[in-house]
Image (spheres, rainbow, N blue to C red):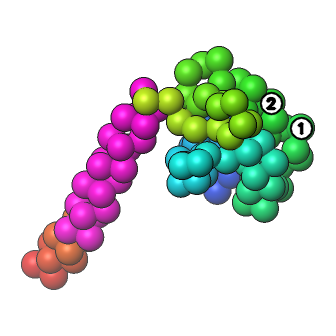
Amino acid sequence: MGYSTDVPDGATQRHSRMMELLTFVNVNSPPGASITNIQSHMLKVYGLKFKTTSEMVQELTPSGAIKVDGHGFYRLTEKQQAAMKTLVAQEKTNNTVGPLIKRIDKVKKRT
């Protein structure tokens, strides 16, 4: 039995969810996002249980991606903020190249 390309493998799905969580925390800083804010967002977007999201946050905190302040708000660490800026810059580059490649392909088909 073959695998469907429409459904991402577990690692791809996990990466997508982690990036969504980090993006949500980044967008809500300052002041940051509470655990309940993060859990609610992930429930709405992916249908994740609060426990699953809590486990993701617990994993991201000691890894150095996010940190919690004295008021219970999560923020990206400086290291993760720099990584997010790099990703955003890469996405902008990819988005501008994509339409150009499509136009080049159309031109090639005509000739």
Give left or right: position of 92 versus 42: left
Q: What element carries label 1?
A: helix
**Magenta stretch contains residue 77:** no
C-alpha distance separating marks 1 and 2: 6 Å
Q: Does the magenta stretch include residue 84?
A: yes
User: Is the Cβ of the residue at disc 1 closer than 8 Å to that at disc 2?
Assistant: yes
Circle 1 packing at 10 Å, graded few (<14), some (14-19), many (20+), is few
Looking at the image, which residue is at 73% across and 45% down?
34
Q: In which quarter of the image is the N terminus?
A: top right
Give the magenta-colored segment's residue range: 79-100
Main secondary structure type of the part rendered in magenta: helix
Amino acid type assigned to the residue bearing label 2 in the image: Glu
Q: Can residue 103 be seen in this view?
A: yes
Residue drawn at 53 percent across, 36 percent down: 76
Q: Which of 109 and 106 is in front in this view?
A: 106
Q: Please name the amino acid that badge 1 sits on.
A: Lys
Label 2: element kind: helix
Residue with the mark numbered 2: 55
Q: Residue 51 carries which label?
A: 1
> For the point 53% across and 54% down, which residue is it?
27
